[in-house]
């Protein structure tokens, strides 16, 4: 009876020994392959641990990056709000300045009208002054003539008294 194959009774001991050697060789190869696979598994386990650590690090970096992104988005939002406030303020100041300019232009326009009225009145006064000066010269001339006449008449009276 064959030790390696108890059910196979038709094999002679030489074949049985050859099969036994072949099986032993296959066991040795399988054992070597198991050792190699265990070694490979160990290396892959180390690699896996390294990759898991790297994944953990990347996850941590991702969380940090997401925090930074949220912080930057918040800062951008804050800056956008400030920019809008500045634009609003600028627009308000510009509108106020336009209103002030419009007020000043209306004021200037009013002053120009007053100046035109005053210039018109001044022109009338100048004409009136010239007229009065002409009348004054005429009156002075008549006054001198009358004084000359009075002096002539006084002379005639004095001559008539003598």
Image: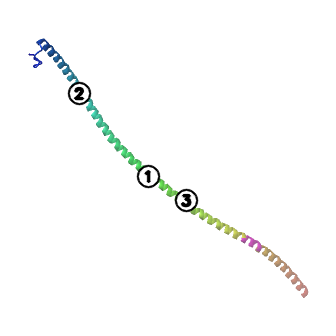
Residue 41, by quadrant, is top left
SS of the residue under disc 1 = helix
Q: Nearer the viewer, mark 1 or mark 2?
A: 2
Q: Residue at x 58, y 62 (%)?
A: 104
Q: What's the CA distance linking mark 1 and mark 2?
A: 59 Å
Residue 68 in the image, given as x and y percentages of width and height: 36, 43
Q: Does 127 sit above or below residue 34?
A: below
Q: Is residue 50 left or right of residue 1?
A: right
Residue nearer the viewer, 151 or 92: 92
Dot 1 and dot 2 residues touching (CB under 8 Å): no
Task: Find disc 1 in the rendering and name its residue.
Answer: 82
Query: Residue 160, labelled with which disc?
Result: none
Task: Please state the extent of the stretch shown in magenta in the rendering.
Answer: 124-131
Q: Earlier in the sequence, mark 1 or mark 2?
A: 2
Query: Residue 41, labelled with which disc?
Result: 2
Tell me the crowding category of disc 2: few under 14, some 14 to 19, or many 20 or more residues within 10 angstroms, Cα based.
some
Q: Earlier in the sequence, mark 3 or mark 1?
A: 1
Outermost residue, top direction? 14
Query: Residue 98, labelled with which disc?
Result: 3
């Amino acid at each position: 009876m064959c030790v390696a194959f108890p059910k196979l009774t038709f094999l002679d001991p030489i074949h049985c020994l050859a099969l036994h050697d072949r099986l032993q060789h296959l066991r040795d190869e399988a054992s070597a392959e198991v050792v190699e696979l265990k070694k490979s598994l160990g290396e892959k386990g180390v690699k896996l641990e390294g990759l898991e650590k790297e994944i953990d690090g990347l996850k941590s970096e991702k969380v940090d990056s997401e925090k930074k992104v949220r912080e930057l988005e918040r800062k951008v939002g804050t800056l956008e709000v400030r920019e809008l406030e500045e634009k609003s303020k600028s627009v308000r100041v510009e509108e106020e300045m336009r209103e002030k300019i419009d007020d000043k232009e209306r004021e200037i326009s009013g002053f120009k009208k007053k100046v035109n009225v005053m210039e018109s009145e001044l022109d009338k006064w100048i004409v009136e002054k010239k007229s009065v000066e002409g009348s004054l010269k005429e009156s002075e001339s008549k006054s001198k003539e009358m004084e000359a006449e009075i002096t002539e008449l006084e002379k005639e009276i004095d001559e008539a008294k003598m």
